[in-house]
Image (spheres, grey):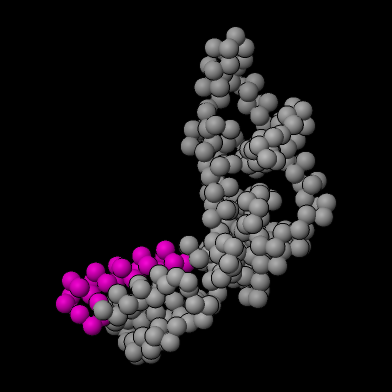
Amino acid sequence: MLGMSYRQVAMFLGALDCPVSKSSIERDVSAAGLKAQALHRAALGKGLRVRVLGVDGTGVALAGRSGGMLFFVDIAGGRLLAVEVVGESDSRAVRKHVLAVMSAVGAEEVRTDEHPVYERAVGEAHHRLCLTHWRKSKLKRAMELYRQAVAAGRSLEAENLRRLVELLRLQPRPPTVPEELEHLVVRYSRCRKGLLWKINQLLQHVERTWSKVSDDVADPTNNSTERLIGLTLKIRAKTMRGFKSLAKVQSHPYLASFLRGTQGICDLRAVI
């Protein structure tokens, strides 16, 4: 769970006068992971209620091929809820799993990045975008166009883009589209070529998605989901060439989550 390879764990245990092969460690971890997964899923159906459900996908390396995983996290509690073997490109499977987890935990809201698959999976009334992801992507594009405007000597466009950046960074962020942004959208609405067309497209996209971004006072981001993906999967994936099977890659986040425990305590007897 510290990101060490099976070989390194075997060397570490050997230094403690506990000789064991890396193959035995792999089998033990896999068996413990399956038990942790079963325990987790059993607990999920026992009246657990979550207000905001964070959803995000990630790629994973398998031996000789690649796959996709979908993570479901309780935003408020930072708890892993479910992990499913499905890529974000499979819209039918994504919708199926999102609706199933929503129903299981009684979630009122699903929070994701801007991947189009989630717009089709959840009704607009129950779907909100992660503020961090939304703001970061819009600022990046606005700054790219700003630099292009400066290089082309388009001072008016550069000033408008600078103002757009300021609107995107507003704190607190207005829940509805600012009037100044609406004026910018109208100003470029007829532009169809070159830099002005690119600015037009960015402004329209910002206006269209502004009200879809989460305005949750406690936490308007999906950072908890991304953090759990890193802690329960990515830290392990960096030290290996690839998991050997989908079953092992799916059970590993459950085991990592189990070992994190409740208030730092877990009962190892439940999985050994």
Q: Main secondary structure of the magenta part?
A: helix
The x, y position of residue 104, in whole percent, is: 77, 58
Question: Residue 183, can we see it?
Answer: yes
Asked whether, in this view, residue 116 is left or right of residue 49, the answer is left
Q: Which region shows up in magenta?
A: 134-158
The N terminus: image quadrant: top right
Question: Residue 208, can we see it?
Answer: no
In this view, the residue in front, 72 or 268, is: 268
Q: Is residue 146 magenta?
A: yes
In this view, the residue in front, 83 or 260, is: 260
Quarter holding residue 103: bottom right
The x, y position of residue 154, in whole percent, is: 20, 79
The x, y position of residue 106, in whole percent, is: 76, 63
Give the residue drawn at x 59%, y 41%.
Answer: 232
Residue 73, compared with residue 214, is above or below; it is above
Give the residue drawn at x 50%, y 66%.
Answer: 131
How many numbered marks are there?
A: 0
The x, y position of residue 65, in whole percent, is: 53, 42
Quarter holding residue 233: top right
